[in-house]
């Protein structure tokens, strides 16, 4: 993770495990091949969704969705350099102390490469299906703040206690301790101006803007975050700014156009909205679009690649980014 005076960083988000012609028995082998190809070609981090059921743009409910921390731990064991994290953990799924233990264990397995990505959760159908309460957004944000407090305490103190409105811990022991001093960095996803960006200023090391964030509102969001940082007595520059994008890459411009047309049809999005969510084109075009994101103030981009089951596309993306940006 870096600031503007350093090399920009790029993550690969594994948001679909519906690999064509791959059985469940071979699913992890393919996921791990994707992750290792990403690491070898120059990506800095590997991310997975924290969902129980597939949904949204990433796929259909009947498609495979492995449990996030089990998958990440296995991928951490197959890689050596990339950071590993969730984009993002649903605060509703786990007791906060248990989550701190999971994130710490991932940090130990990866020898200090874990990142705790977290957010307020949004996909109500999986909560209904699994019998998990889905409270109103205000309560989910309150729970998110208490969870962040508990995780920070358990990363940094030997036997912390905490009593909040929703959660409590009492002399909670977290052994083994995190490998990384201070514990895994915390990424908070979202750009809500009332609560989310305030929590970023208070607790996060990294923020992540959704892929549909319009260019004309990015600077406004940064201004809001800057104001909250001032209130917290924290340097705005200390927070690593990242954004999510869908990457549609092909060796040629025409190939990318064809691939993009299929993707837009699958998403059923109007052209204007689709264009705002993707980085699309030949390697040269991709570089120009990423440069625009960096010029807007982002330190890094986390991409999901529409056809990441194709190892050659993962390598093309990684080498394109690394060869140009260093």
Image (spheres, grey):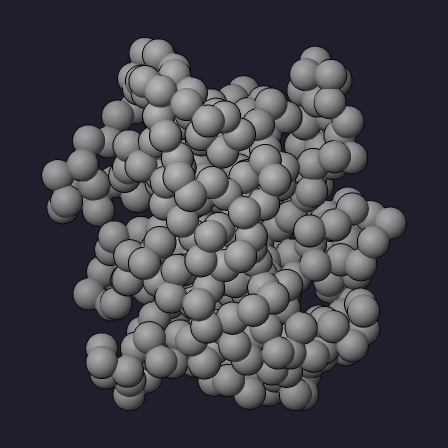
Instruction: From the top left corner, tell me how far across and down residue 30 is, in percent.
Output: 38, 80
Q: Residue at x 35, y 25 (%)?
A: 172
Q: Quadrant of residue 41?
A: bottom right
The number of numbered discs placed on residues in the rendered structure image is 0
Residue 25 shows in the view: yes
Q: For the point 40% across and 75% down, which residue is it?
A: 31
Return the x and y of residue 131 as percentages of the image width and height: 12, 39
Q: Against 198, is 23 above or below? A: below
Q: Is residue 18 positioned above or below 277 on the image?
A: below
Q: Quadrant of the C terminus?
A: bottom right
Q: Residue furthest right?
A: 5
Where on the picture, by quarter, is residue 202?
top right
Comparing 88 with 28, the one in front is: 28
Expressed as whole percent of the image width and height from the top left, the position of residue 277 reads: 56, 57
Residue 85, image x, y percentages: 48, 53
Q: Is residue 288 left or right of residue 162?
A: right
Residue 115 against residue 283 in the figure, above or below: above
Residue 249 appears in the picture as rendered? no
Whether residue 4 sits left or right of residue 20 in the image: it is right
Image side of residue 286 versus residue 160, left or right: right
Query: In this rendering, would 183 be left or right of 218?
Result: left
Residue at x 50%, y 59% (from the top left corner) = 110
């Amino acid at each position: 993770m870096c600031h503007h005076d350093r090399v920009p960083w790029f993550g690969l988000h594994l948001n679909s495990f519906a690999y064509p012609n791959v059985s469940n028995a071979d699913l992890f082998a393919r996921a791990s091949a994707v992750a290792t190809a990403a690491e070898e070609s120059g990506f800095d981090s590997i991310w997975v969704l924290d969902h129980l059921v597939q949904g949204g743009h990433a796929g259909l409910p009947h498609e495979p969705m492995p449990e996030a921390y089990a998958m990440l731990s296995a991928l951490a064991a197959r890689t050596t350099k990339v950071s590993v994290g969730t984009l993002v953990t649903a605060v509703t799924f786990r007791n906060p102390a248990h989550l701190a233990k999971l994130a710490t264990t991932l940090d130990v397995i990866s020898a200090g490469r874990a990142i705790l990505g977290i957010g307020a959760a949004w996909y109500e159908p999986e909560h209904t299906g699994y019998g998990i309460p889905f409270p109103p957004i205000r309560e989910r944000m309150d729970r998110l703040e208490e969870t962040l407090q508990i995780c920070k305490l358990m990363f940094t103190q030997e036997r912390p206690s905490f009593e909040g409105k929703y959660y409590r811990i009492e002399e909670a022991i977290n052994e083994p301790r995190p490998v990384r001093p201070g514990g895994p960095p915390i990424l908070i996803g979202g750009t809500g101006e009332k609560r989310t960006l305030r929590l970023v200023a208070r607790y996060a090391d990294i923020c992540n803007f959704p892929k549909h964030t319009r260019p004309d509102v990015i600077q406004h969001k940064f201004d809001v975050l800057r104001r909250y940082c001032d209130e917290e007595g924290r340097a705005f520059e200390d927070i690593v700014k990242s954004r999510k994008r869908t990457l549609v890459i092909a060796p040629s411009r025409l190939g990318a156009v064809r691939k993009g047309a299929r993707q837009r049809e699958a998403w059923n999005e109007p052209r204007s909205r689709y264009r705002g969510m993707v980085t699309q084109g030949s390697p040269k075009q991709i570089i120009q679009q990423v440069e625009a994101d960096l010029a807007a103030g982002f330190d890094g981009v986390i991409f999901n690649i529409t056809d990441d089951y194709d190892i050659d596309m993962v390598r093309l993306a990684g080498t394109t980014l690394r060869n140009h940006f260093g």
